[in-house]
């Protein structure tokens, strides 16, 4: 069975601090995909990133960076120099690869509050 | 804009009544997904459509839940004999095709908040 754990329920930081959101996953598949989504107060989920299980390169996009470690089954998300607009609930998700990759398993989410 | 739209945005109903939730996907997207998000919880996969067919209904929580999609476009999620535990936000998403391949990311609608009294 697949499972995604986000142990941090809520995090509060002060603007300009760096913050890392943890994601640990469980799967028996060798081919799988990991995702991060952002859900701002408006409610609509916004896709942030997709990684496949064969690509362990870390990725940086502006203030966002992702650290994929297969050895620890983790896919952590770091926001550098956080801003108030980063306040949202962040979800990590996992799906199988190939033709089975339709059932997305989401973690419970981490609520990030960035205080001015 | 041409995003995913859902209606109604809010629905309050009495226990035992049937409800229908509607999703209009992005034009041209062949895959459509329904999720449920209970208060303070993550997203729970319900069902997905590829075209008009639903290869995976494994997430539907009970036989009171059903969904259909006609014309490869609009989808309706129906909950019969609603219960209080059905209260949640129901999210719809669409993607160009099913599966996690590049360019198939899911675009989410704003959701329908269902409250069962």
Image (cartoon, coloured by chain):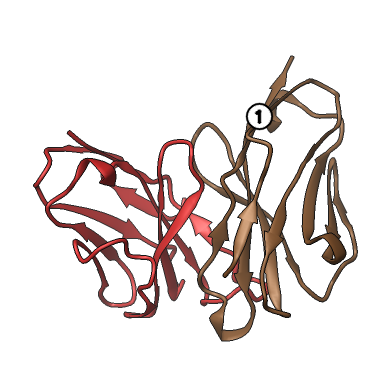
Q: Residue at x 48, y 36 (%)?
A: B40
* Above or below, comparing residue A116 to residue B26 in the picture: above
Foreground pick, B103 / A89: A89
Q: Residue at x 86, y 31 (%)?
A: A18
* Above or below, comparing residue A36 to residue B64 in the picture: above
Left or right, residue B97 beside residue B82: right
Q: Residue furthest bottom?
A: A99
Q: Residue at x 48, y 51 (%)?
A: B43
* Above or below, comparing residue A113 to residue A50 in the picture: above
* Above or below, comparing residue B83 to residue B52 in the picture: above
Left or right, residue A46 beside residue B25: right
Q: Quadrant of residue B35?
A: bottom left
Q: Chain of mark 1?
A: A
Picture coordinates of residue B9, whole percent (x, y):
31, 40
Foreground pick, A25 / B88: A25
Picture coordinates of residue B52, whole percent (x, y):
32, 80
Q: Quadrant of residue B10?
A: top left
Question: What kind of element bears circle 1?
Answer: loop
The answer to whether residue B3 shows anywhere in this view is: no
**Quadrant showing the C terminus of chain A:** top right
Left or right, residue B19 beside residue B32: left
Q: Which residue is mark 1?
A: A87
Picture coordinates of residue B105, whole percent (x, y):
60, 65
> In this structure image, what is the colour of chain B?
red
Picture coordinates of residue A4, whole percent (x, y):
63, 56
Foreground pick, B90 / B85: B85
> In this structure image, what is the colour of chain A?
brown
């Amino acid at each position: 069975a697949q499972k995604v754990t986000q142990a941090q329920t809520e995090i509060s930081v002060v603007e300009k601090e760096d913050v890392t959101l943890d994601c640990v996953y469980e799967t028996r598949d060798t081919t799988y995909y990991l995702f991060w989504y952002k859900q701002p107060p408006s409610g609509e989920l916004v896709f942030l990133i997709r990684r496949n299980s064969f690509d362990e390169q870390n990725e940086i996009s502006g203030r966002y960076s992702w650290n994929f470690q297969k050895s620890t089954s983790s896919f952590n998300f770091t926001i550098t120099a956080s801003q108030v607009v980063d306040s949202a609930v962040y979800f990590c998700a996992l799906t199988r690869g190939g033709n089975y990759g339709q059932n997305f398993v989401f973690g419970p989410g981490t609520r990030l509050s960035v205080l001015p | 804009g041409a995003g995913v739209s859902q209606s109604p945005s809010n629905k309050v109903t009495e226990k035992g009544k049937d409800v229908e939730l509607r999703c209009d996907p992005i034009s041209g997207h062949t895959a459509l997904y329904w999720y449920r998000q209970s208060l303070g919880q993550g997203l729970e996969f319900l069902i997905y459509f590829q075209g008009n067919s639903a290869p995976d209904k494994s997430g539907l929580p009970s036989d009171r839940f059903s969904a259909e999609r006609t014309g490869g476009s609009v989808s309706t999620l129906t909950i019969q004999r609603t219960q209080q535990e059905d209260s949640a936000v129901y999210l719809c998403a669409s993607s160009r095709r099913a599966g996690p391949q590049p360019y198939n990311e899911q675009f989410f609608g704003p959701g329908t908040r269902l409250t069962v009294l």
